[in-house]
Image (spheres, rainbow, N blue to C red):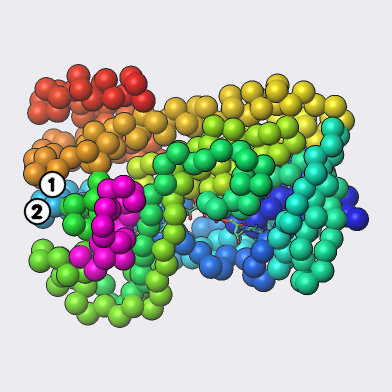
Amino acid sequence: MIQVDALIIGAGPIGGYLARKLCHAGHTVLIVEEHDQIGRPFQCAGLVNPGSMEKVGLESTALTRIWGARIHGPSGTLVEIGTPERTRTWSVCRKLFDEAIVAQAISAGCSIMLNSTPKNTSISEDYIITTLSTDGGELTVKSKVLLGCDGAHSWVRRYHRMGRVRETMIGFQIDVTGYQHKDGKLDMYTGQQIAPGFFAWAIPTGTTTRIGTFSRPDLLGEISSEETLTELLNHELWKDRFEGCSEVGRYCGPVPAKPVKKPALGRVFLFGDAAGLCKPTTGGGIGPGFTHVDNSLELVSKVIESDNINSNATDRWARQIIKPIMKKHDRARALRDFFLTNSTDEELDSIFRVWARPEVIELIQKYGEIENPVPLGLKMLKDVPEFRRIALRAANSLIFA
Ligand SMILES: Cc1cc2nc3c(=O)[nH]c(=O)nc-3n(C[C@H](O)[C@H](O)[C@H](O)COP(=O)(O)OP(=O)(O)OC[C@H]3O[C@@H](n4cnc5c(N)ncnc54)[C@H](O)[C@@H]3O)c2cc1C
């Protein structure tokens, strides 16, 4: 039997980041990963915002620095934003990024077992026993905490009946060569045919481009997300951009974007996609996952150091920690629904015509943050006459978010 303070299931970016932080706090950590390598397979557009990049210092894994965007309305109205001086986000190689995060954890003292999965756990008052299936054999691990960083389909969440993620988008993406993008700018496309209620993207990734689309299953109806991508590639307005492209890879995956109600159950905690922490606006999960880890460290350390925890108090504390992130996401979701998800193409076209005006582009340049769209949304509702008329309706959605 192996004995550690923390057993982490899943060596994705959130598991790796959490492992490093716990090692630095003086705890012994084992990460268990089901695959035989880190960072494969991945389902991600690879955007990492500057704040999150700063936390791991992995600019070396970036393929392109993104400083601007061309955003297209359903009928082609173009909103072009960004200036080269301000990095808006990084487009990384997820394989290199995940590997480097896990390498940082290993350098900090963490152990790792590949090709391994948990089979069952039993929880006692002062420890947890987990049986692992590993390379055809079995191994028992005794730990003070069990930390589920095992992604959208989390075994830890399901095994411990920690509830359901309350909104999940689905993303479909291909890697291509030959797409004509503008240096340092990503492209976003909208319209019910190509991304019902959401948007599609083309992100420069060094010598290739990631082209993807995401939506919610209830909005897709009878069509698959793969079909929405085909619609984008054949779209009357934009097909010229895709004509010379050759596909070199494809991925599809869930984007869990409304957290579980119970992120902790005594000595068991959920993080990252396992907790349902992706942003409802962009689908980005790395930034909120890192923030949640940072905010939870004190609590997890306390539980590790205690032989006798009050489960109810721990669960309450864990809910308090996730609440501000949830609140921020709920407000962003309300604005997303208001400006994008609940708009018809005609309504969206008229919103784009307003966004494309020079004074509104100036507002977007000044207040637009991929990480936090709420200040820009509120500013637009307040300052743009066309939106002021509908501000009351928007305010209601925000208040009740
Ligand atoms: C199409 C698409 C595009 C996206 N684009 C972006 C983006 O641009 N930026 C961004 O920030 N986010 C993006 N996301 C979301 C992002 O990929 C996730 O939020 C992020 O990977 C979450 O990290 P994680 O460590 O929680 O989970 P994961 O990255 O899913 O890692 C979980 C790890 O756990 C392992 N695992 C799972 N089950 C077990 C088990 N039972 N036993 C052992 N190991 C297990 C997996 O093999 C994996 O290594 C996108 C998602 C999709 C689908």
- Other residues around mark 2 within 10 Å, as few (<14) / some (14–19) / many (≥20): some
How far, Cα to Cα, is label 1 from label 2? 8 Å
Q: Could you tell me which residue is drawn at 10 percent across and 25 percent down?
A: 385
* Front residue of 93 and 228: 228
Query: Which numbered tag is attached to residue 345?
Result: 1
Q: Is residue 125 above or below residue 393?
A: below
- Disc 2: residue Cβ within 8 A of ligand 1's nearest atom: no
Relative image position of residue 352 (x, y in whole percent): 13, 43
Q: Residue furthest right?
A: 1
Disc 2 element:
loop
- Residue of label 2: 75
Label 2 is placed on what type of residue? Ser
Q: Quadrant of residue 193?
A: bottom left
Q: Is residue 287 visible?
A: no
Q: Is residue 319 above or below residue 47?
A: above
Q: Is residue 149 above or below residue 178?
A: above
Query: Which numbered tag is attached to residue 13?
Result: none
Q: Which region shows up in magenta?
A: 213-231
- Disc 1: residue Cβ within 8 A of ligand 1's nearest atom: no
Q: Is residue 152 visible?
A: yes
* Front residue of 84 and 39: 39
